[in-house]
Amino acid sequence: MTLVDTSSWIEFLRGRDSVAGQRVKALLARGDAAWCDMTLVELWHGARGHTEKQALTELEGELRLYPVNEPVWEQARLLARRCRDKGITVSTADLVIAAAAIAHKLPLEHCDSHFDQILPLEHD
């Protein structure tokens, strides 16, 4: 199973012929795509038009949802401290999504360079 970040979902949902969109398509075909609560909030917040909203509704019935639970919040706080110590500024949502991937022991599919800064801090 792979946790898919909002950035890659957007590529897929908007039908962009991008590498990230193709990776999401492949994950879906294998039944390996998942998301977390924070990703869903971001996607619904930015959903455009009937087609995207319909796709999100259908995917909600099919995909595994990994909860943003206490271990995720603990990991997010740790990542926030480590980012601040390194002078890295990222969104709270990205911290929570990265923390969900780490806490649930899942790889993270993304096309957002913030994760390239956040994820290595897991072991700092």
Image: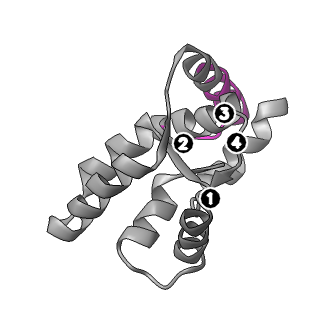
N-terminal label among 1 and 3: 3
Q: Nearer the viewer, residue 64 or 18?
A: 64
At 60% from the left edge and 78% from the top edge, which residue is drawn? 19
Horizontal side of residue 110 vs 68, given as left or right: right
At 46% from the left edge and 49% from the top edge, which residue is drawn? 63
Task: Give x and y (percent) for residue 108.
Answer: 65, 50
Residue type marked 3: Cys
Looking at the picture, does residue 37 appear above or below residue 78?
below
**Mark-to-mark CA distance, 3 and 4:** 20 Å
Circle 2: element type? loop
Discs 3/4, front: 4
**Mark-to-mark CA distance, 2 and 1:** 10 Å
Circle 4: element type? loop
The circle drawn on residue 106 is 4
- The answer to which quarter of the image holds residue 20 is bottom right
Residue type marked 4: Leu
The magenta region covers 77-91
The circle drawn on residue 113 is 1
Residue type marked 2: Val
N-terminal label among 4 and 2: 2
Labelled pair 4, 2 in contact (Cβ < 8 Å): no
Discs 4/1, front: 4
Task: Give x and y (percent) for residue 67.
Answer: 49, 28
Circle 3: element type? helix
Looking at the picture, does residue 19 appear above or below residue 76?
below
Q: Main secondary structure of the magenta part?
A: helix
Q: Is residue 123 visible?
A: yes
The circle drawn on residue 71 is none
**Mark-to-mark CA distance, 3 and 2:** 8 Å
Residue indicated by mark 2: 90
Circle 1: element type? loop
**Mark-to-mark CA distance, 4 and 2:** 20 Å
